[in-house]
Every structure is written in structure tokens, then in C-alpha cells.
Image (tube, helix red, strand yellow):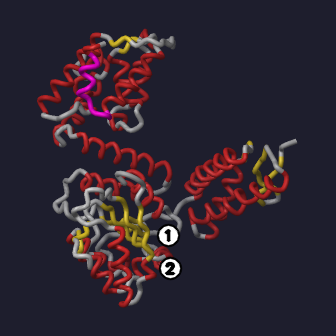
Amino acid sequence: MKDKSEIIRNFSESSIEIFNEAKNISLQYRGRMDSYHLLWAFLKKENNFLRYILPAHTIIKMIKDKGNFKKESTSNTLIVTKEIQKVLKVAVKIRDKNRNKKVTPPELFSALIKENNIKELLKDYGDKINKFEMEMIKIGYDERKYNIIKSLNLLDKYAKRTIPGQSEACKKIMSILRMVKLGLDLKPERPDGVFLFVGPVGTGKYSMAKAIAKYFSENEFNLLNIDMDLYQDAWDFDKFLNLLLQNIKDKRNANDSGGVVVFNKIDLAHPSIANFLSDALNKGSFAGSDGDNHSFSKHTIIFIPSDKLSEKHDNIGFIKSVKSSDENYLKGIQRSILTCIDDIIPFEKLKPKHLEKVARSNITTVINRISKEYNIHIKYSDDVLEYIAAEAIRMQRGRREVNKLIDDYISLPIVNLFVEKGVSKILISMKNSKVSIIDRSS
């Protein structure tokens, strides 16, 4: 209808995504879009951080228990009820009050919770809603900051799912990222977080770096991994500087999308290079030989020690209770590097249940890829996961050994079997204490 279409033009892209989700839901239930559909859409959208403030499953169940939702009845025609039209108009008024160009999702939600049916439905969640509105007032209902919060919550959820056993590490990282990404730090010219990741080999340090890059590279996945063992001598400085000049944009570059820079094996870098890096990170930028000032301000910086130093730390036994003032723990990391970090993040040694979870996730990924590529139906037994986890612990290489074992015992044998016999159905199980790939095609 004309009135509705005129209002929608005033809405941001994120708000329209939520509206379209509500439209899809309403078409499953007779096609009359009401306020319940819109609330459902807010909670259903995976990239919407309301589902981290309100108990999504509980509220969606409450919505489904309403009379109009007990039985699905699809429709090809959408009718936007007067109550939804009123919500949209109220959202525009809130937008005007905040002086935003477009109605943001928080403004749309603020309008929605004023609707009588929703007000009644959410009456037991008043404190959480008030907290949400206070947070939105702080960021001025700003679309960019709202999207940052979405990314932060998605990162938090993704890290907890894919990097098991590191809940404390995730908590510390998220705390700092929330502060710097929302511009609440005292020195905004500095990088968006400077971390020292420490812990035994194969505990998820690099996986965490990739996760941050996944959600905080604005245009495309952007992770720069620099092996500092290539810069152990004083004469390596120019080579190191040239690498930075190629990858860290100057301050005037509007296309700098940020991302993550990992300085791997940082304990092996020459002191002069470590000193330069510390100075550049504390200032947030460095002057290049090209005459430009190159900025780290949109990047998250992660230092990871070499495997040798990580194993030494693990053997000493101070990984679990490290404090930034622990002199014993800091041995091996140059003092200049320690002066520029925001926090030391200890990653704990993974337990069998965590390695089994990693194995299950990675095996599923491999199986899905092989099944799609070669049209093979593949199943596996849980004792395979237990075996891979036990072997990874025995080898003391954590996630790395899990991935290596999956390649050695699953990926390569399946591909070889397919090339030799053209199999279509496979079972992966344990036989005589070994992983066995069984052809079930016939």
C-alpha cells in the first residue's frame, strides 16, 4: 500500500531486512503482518543482537502459542495491518527526534515495544528492555555502532562454538573489543585492541585471530600473518618495513577496511624491530619511506609466541593463572612489546571433550566438502572422534594434531578410495584400534 511504501523509504537497509523477515513469517501464517510477526523477525534474524538481550526461544514460543500461530497457513498475499503501519510511523518519529537519516533497527524496536500487544507480551522483561534502550541512547541509535554491536555478538557466539575450552580467553577479548570498537577507549588513534595470545600449541590462538578477522574486516576477509622468525637480524628491518608499507594503508586512504595483523613468533624478532613496532602501535601509526603516515587504528593486533616458547611456558605451569605482572611468565617476550599490549590472553590446554568437539566440527566440514565434490554419502562413528582426540592429547599438539589426523586418516584415504574404485557410500569407524574407511557402495 502507498502509505507503507512511503514509510519504508525512510528505513535503513538493516531495518528493511528485519521487515522483510517479518513479511516472510506472516506469509506462512495467512499473510496478515502484525506486531507479533515483527517481534519474531527481530529475534529470528541471526545477525540481530536483540536475541542476545531477550530469550529468543522463549518469546518465539510465547508468540506461537497465540491463536493465529498455532497452525501454518501459507499465503501469497501480504496484508500489512494498521497496528504495523502505526509502528512504522512511530519509528519514523523516533528517527526524526534522533536526527538520523534512516530508521535504524533499535529505533524500529523502540517503536514496536510501545505497541499494546508487544508491551503486554514483554511485560516480564522490562529491566532488559530498559537496559537495551539505555545502551541505544549511549550510541545515539547510530547505525554504524549498531552494526558493530551485531558483529561483536556474532563473533562472541562464533568463537564459543568453534573454539571450545577457551571461555575465559573469549571473555577477556570481547571485553576489550567492545570498548575499542565502540570508540570508548582513551586513545582512539591506537589499534582496535593489541593482544598477546599465549598458551600451549594447538589451543585455538590463530583460530581466534581468524574469527576476529571474519567479523571485523569491513569489505573482505583481511588477515595478515607475519612470521617474525624471518626478521631476527638487524639488517632485516628494511624488509620488515616494506612488508608493512604494502599492507598497512596510509591515513588518507578511505578504502582501508581494517582487519587483523598477527605477529607470529614475536619472541624471535630482532630487538630493533620489536622497538619500532612497539613505538608504532603506541602512536597508532608509523612514517614510511614513501613519505606517508601509515595507520594501525582500524586493525586488531595479535602477538603469538613461537611454539618453542609456548611449550616452555606450558611446562613451567603458569598458563592458567597468568597476570601481566608475573615476571616468570613474561620471560622470552621483549619488554618493548609488553609495553604496548592491552592484555595478555592465556589459552588453556584443551581437554578430551573439547578436542572431540573440534574433531566433530572439522570432520563434518571435511565430509560435507567431499560429499559435495565427489557425490559420496559418508557416515562416521563417535569412537573415531574419541580416538582422534586421544591421539591429539598424546602428541600434545591440540587442534593442530586433530586437523593433521583428519587429513591423514579421513580426507586422503577417502579421496584415494574414490579415485581407485569410484565409491558412492562410505563408513568411517574404528577397527583394531585404527581408523578404518569402509566401502559401503554395494
Q: Amino acid at mark 1?
A: Pro
Image side of residue 72 versus residue 60, left or right: right
Q: Position of residue 111 (x, y in %)?
A: 22, 23
Residue at the limit of the structure toward the right, as seen here: 442
> For the residue labelled by badge 1, is the local secondary structure a helix, a strand or a loop?
loop
Is 134 inside the magenta-drawn segment? no
Q: Quadrant of the C terminus?
A: top right
- Identity of the residue drawn at 55% across and 59% down: 351
Q: Which of 9 and 176 lies nearest the eye of the viewer? A: 9
Q: Position of residue 100 (x, y in %)?
A: 16, 35
**Does the magenta stretch mainly form a helix, a strand or a loop?**
helix
Is 9 inside the magenta-drawn segment? yes
Give the magenta part as a residue range. 4-14
Q: Quadrant of the N terminus?
A: top left
Q: Position of residue 241 (x, y in %)?
A: 33, 79
- Label for residue 255? none
Position of 30 relative to 159 (above/below): above
- Label for residue 200? 1
Residue at the limit of the structure toward the front, as seen here: 290
Mark 2, Cα crowd under 10 Å, few <14 / some 14-19 / many 20+, is few
